[in-house]
Image (tube, rainbow, N blue to C red):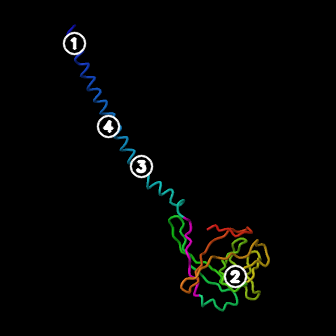
């Protein structure tokens, strides 16, 4: 009986020390596996997060200037002249080039102004009517003077002017969209 007790005493410390080392190896490998999984998961999630947030972080429409024409082309304006400009729009990952009609005219002081052809009432394209010497909206009958000021009709404001600049003798315009059905000019894109 004494031998059994001694034998069991000899096996207990060695089995407990091997159990501790086996347990510590398993927990170390578990921690190492957990850290490795965390690192790989983090590295794989970075492109997914960038993909999801890209449209939110990038502007919808790049505001680039488009050439309208040489200043000498507009020196003797007596009535508004329609020009078609190309604008480049970036919507998320898609890049599109579209054409928009603008009118080059002079204000009361004789300075060049560029007007958008979009009616501020409901967004119809407003043509210049030579017979009436006014812009007349075909949708709801709003009329505007040659400099874009409101004459009559349901529109709450005059035609919208666009920001212009002159570079190397060329007139450049920055096309923008404005909120409709409001009396103040608000940029929306």
| The label number, if any, that marks residue 6 in the structure image | 1
Mark 4 residue element:
helix
Say whether residue 159 is left or right of residue 176. right
Say whether residue 133 is left or right of residue 34. right
**Going from the N terminus, do you reach mark 3 or mark 4 first?**
4
Instruction: Say if 123 sits above or below 44 in the image.
Output: below
- Please state, as top left, top right, bottom left or bottom right, where the C terminus lies in the image: bottom right
Foreground: 52 or 114?
114
- Please state, as top left, top right, bottom left or bottom right, where the N terminus lies in the image: top left
Frontmost of labels 2 and 1 is 1
Residue at the disc numbered 2: 127
Residue 124 position in % (x across, y down): 69, 74
Residue 73 position in % (x across, y down): 61, 90
**Going from the N terminus, do you reach mark 3 or mark 1 first?**
1
Q: CA distance from mark 4 to mark 1?
A: 35 Å
Region rendered in magenta: 59-70
- Which residue, as the protein is rendered here, is positioned at the far bottom? 76
Question: Which class describes the residues within 10 Å of circle 4: few (<14), some (14-19), or many (20+)?
Answer: few
**Going from the N terminus, do you reach mark 2 or mark 1 first?**
1
Q: CA distance from mark 3 to mark 2?
A: 57 Å
Q: CA distance from mark 2 to mark 1?
A: 110 Å
- Which residue, as the protein is rendered here, is positioned at the far top? 1
- Which residue, as the protein is rendered here, is positioned at the far front? 109
Question: Which class describes the residues within 10 Å of circle 2: few (<14), some (14-19), or many (20+)?
Answer: some
User: Based on the displayed image, in which of its 4 quarters is residue 116 positioned?
Assistant: bottom right
| The label number, if any, that marks residue 29 in the structure image | 4
**Going from the N terminus, do you reach mark 4 or mark 1 first?**
1
Question: Which class describes the residues within 10 Å of circle 3: few (<14), some (14-19), or many (20+)?
Answer: few
Residue at the disc numbered 3: 42
| The label number, if any, that marks residue 72 in the structure image | none
Q: CA distance from mark 3 to mark 4?
A: 20 Å
């Amino acid at each position: 009986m004494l031998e059994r007790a001694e034998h069991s005493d000899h096996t207990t410390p060695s089995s407990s020390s091997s159990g501790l080392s086996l347990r510590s190896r398993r927990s170390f490998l578990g921690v190492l596996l957990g850290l490795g999984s965390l690192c790989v998961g983090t590295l794989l999630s970075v492109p997914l997060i960038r993909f999801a947030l890209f449209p939110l972080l990038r502007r919808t429409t790049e505001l680039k200037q488009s050439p309208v024409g040489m200043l000498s082309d507009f020196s003797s304006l007596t009535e508004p002249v329609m020009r078609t400009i190309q604008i480049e729009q970036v919507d998320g990952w898609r890049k599109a080039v579209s054409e928009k009609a603008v009118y080059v005219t002079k204000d009361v002081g004789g300075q060049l102004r560029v007007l958008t052809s979009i009616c501020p009432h409901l967004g119809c394209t407003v043509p210049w009517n030579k017979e009436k010497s006014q812009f007349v909206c075909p949708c709801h009958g709003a009329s505007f003077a040659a400099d874009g000021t409101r004459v009559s009709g349901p529109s709450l404001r005059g035609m919208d002017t666009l920001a212009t600049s002159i570079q190397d003798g060329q007139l450049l315009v920055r096309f923008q969209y404005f909120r409709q059905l409001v009396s103040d000019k608000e940029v929306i894109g």
